[in-house]
Amino acid sequence: MRESTRAYAPTPDSTNHTTPDHYWRNFAAGFASSILAHEAGHIGMSYALGAHPHFGFESGKPTVYSGIDATNDPHKQFLFASAGLNVQAIMDEAILDIPHHRGGSVERGILAGGIATAYFYATIGRNAGNSDITYMARTSSLSRTQASLIYAGLATIQTVRIAHDGHYANFFMRPSSNGAISVGVAVLPER
């Protein structure tokens, strides 16, 4: 049985925070958890495939290396490259599908982290030499565009689901006390 998606304005008790400081701290913890789960997905997949992952830097960026020879085992490298985005997508789907008390600031952070990572890899992050999308394209029959569209498409579906679920009211925009909507700029109501 699906929960009602009626319009719902969260209160401090319903979103698991009592002050804006707590909200953003918890949101940031959820966002960071999503990123860590992404990296843990890569590491776990590497071990599951019998490889030995290691950490390093590429162009100053911290990187998890698979320990897999992509030339000899392209399928294993594809599984490694896709594991991080897959873990985040599964986490987001679980939050959106499994019945529970919805709308907390930590879960909002997890959702935002998964969606932001998918959009990042589908856009500006797709062309980096060590990008997950680049490795998926190199080690499969998918092009960068096709791999990007798969993950951006899933993130878009999740975004639409969030926008239509009243438990996540104000997920993308926050009303202020003067009637404006904060989205980085102020959109003031007509008077």
Image: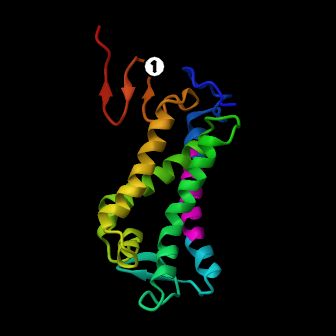
Report if residue 65 is visible in the image.
Answer: no
Can residue 90 be seen here?
yes
- Badge 1 marks a residue whose secondary structure is loop
Q: Nearer the viewer, residue 73 or 12?
A: 73
Q: Position of residue 167 (x, y in %)?
A: 58, 29
Residue 169 at x, y percent in the picture: 52, 28
Q: Please name the amino acid that badge 1 sits on.
A: Ser
What number of labels is visible? 1
Q: Is residue 59 above or below residue 114?
A: below
Image coordinates for residue 97, horizontal then vertical, percent? 62, 42
Q: Position of residue 28 (x, y in %)?
A: 55, 50
Q: Is residue 41 left or right of residue 128?
A: right
Q: Nearer the viewer, residue 131 or 36?
A: 131
Q: Residue beneath label 1, please?
A: 177
Residue at 29% from the left image edge and 7% from the top image edge: 191
Quadrant including the N terminus? top right
Q: Residue furthest top?
A: 191
- Magenta-tinted stretch: 27-41
Tell whether position 187 is magenta: no
Q: Where, by quadrant of the figure, is residue 32 drawn?
A: bottom right
- Residue 40 on the magenta span: yes
